Amino acid sequence: MIDHDEDFLRSEMRQVLDSRAPDRTAMLNRIAANRAASASPQRGRVARLAGSALAVLVVLGIGGVARYALADDHNPTPAAPQRSPPPRPPSRAWWPPRRRRRAAK
């Protein structure tokens, strides 16, 4: 009984499939007509390339503007100058050189 149901189902599906099969020549004719109707394939490629370049520039420009807007260094306030320590006078240990006295014999 199961084999009979399977065979019946397969035959029904095959009939439906055969009735809905596309007409190959009609499809090829439609494709050829669409290709002939296109004005210039080169123009489409150039327009697509220019559009992509413009899209990249827009994205990079928006990113740069957003980065500038979110940064806090638009008008930086000048930092207070740091004070250096006052110079120390030279140590007497090395300047001026001491004269050594000769020991008395």
Image (spheres, grey):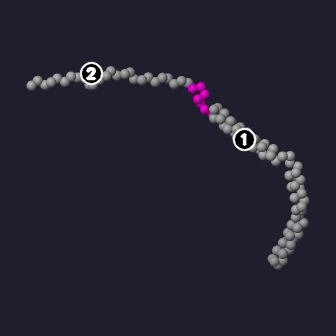
| Viewer-proximal residue among 29 and 86 | 29
Taking 39 as reference, is 104 left or right? left
Element under disc 1: helix
- Pointer 1 local density, CA inside 10 Å: few below 14, some 14–19, many at least 20: few
**78 inside magenta stretch:** no
Residue 83, numbered circle: none
Q: Residue 24's image quarter?
A: bottom right
For the C terminus, the quadrant is top left
Q: Residue 56's image quarter?
A: top right
Residue at 37%, 22% (x, y): give it. Answer: 87
Taking 78 as reference, is 35 left or right? right
Residue 71 vs 26, above or below: the answer is above
Residue at 87%, 58% (x, y): give it. Answer: 28
Can you identify the residue that label 1 sits on? 53
| Viewer-proximal residue among 48 and 70 | 48
x, y (%) of residue 3? 81, 77
Instruction: Write down the region rendered in magenta.
Output: 70-76
Can you identify the residue that label 2 sits on? 96
